[in-house]
Image: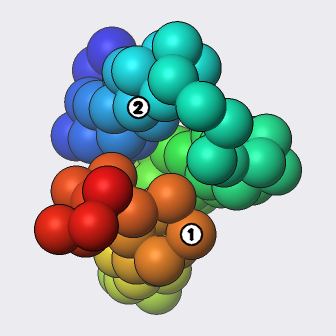
Amino acid sequence: METVYDWVTVAIFAGLIVLFLQRSVGPERDQMWPYFAASVACAVINQVGNKAIDDGSVVLHAVSVAGIVAILAFVQYFLRPFGNKGD
């Protein structure tokens, strides 16, 4: 846990874990693949971000930040962590 990418991706992953555990006790409403896809994406973006820091690459930093935003958008669209009024 040395870089900002480590902290951000682990925080997103921890949020996914909490969401999964919270929803696993109620009626089934999610499939497993969005959790898996977001978790793998967190690992990949973390590695790309760490490589960007090692190399000093602005392009890789941009890819990493865009990837983090994409992960958050993916989670919001497919898992809806904040729910709807009808939930």
Instruction: Please tell me which residue is depicted at 59% across the width and 31% down the height of the picture.
Output: 27
Q: Amino acid at mark 1?
A: Phe
Q: Dot 1: within a 10 Å radius of its alpha carbon, few (fewer than 14), some, or many (20 or more) residues?
A: few
Say which element carries label 2: helix
When the figure is inspected, residue 19 is found, relative to residue 62, above or below; the finding is above
Quarter of the image for residue 32 reads top right
Query: Is residue 58 at all visible to an observer of this figure?
Result: yes
Query: Is residue 61 at all visible to an observer of this figure?
Result: no
Quarter of the image for residue 1 reads top left
Q: Dot 2: within a 10 Å radius of its alpha carbon, few (fewer than 14), some, or many (20 or more) residues?
A: some
Instruction: Please tell me which residue is depicted at 50% across the width and 59% down the height of the picture.
Output: 79
Q: Position of residue 11 (x, y in %)?
A: 29, 31
Separation of residues labelled 2 and 1 (CA atoms) = 12 Å
> Residue 62 versus residue 52: which sits nearer the camera?
62
Q: Amino acid at mark 2?
A: Leu
Residue matched to label 1? 78
Instruction: Please tell me which residue is depicted at 39% across the width and 63% down the height of the picture.
Output: 80
When the figure is inspected, residue 19 is found, relative to residue 57, above or below; the finding is above
> Residue 17 versus residue 57: which sits nearer the camera?
17
Say which element carries label 1: helix
> Residue 67 versus residue 81: which sits nearer the camera?
81
Quarter of the image for residue 66 reads bottom left
When the figure is inspected, residue 61 is found, relative to residue 79, above or below; the finding is below
> Residue 30 versus residue 9: which sits nearer the camera?
30
Residue 19 disc label: 2
Name the quadrant of the C terminus: bottom left
Q: In the rendered picture of this protein, how many numbered marks are placed on residues? A: 2
Q: Position of residue 59 (x, y in %)?
A: 46, 86
Judge left or right: residue 76 versus residue 2: right
Q: Position of residue 85 (x, y in %)?
A: 17, 68
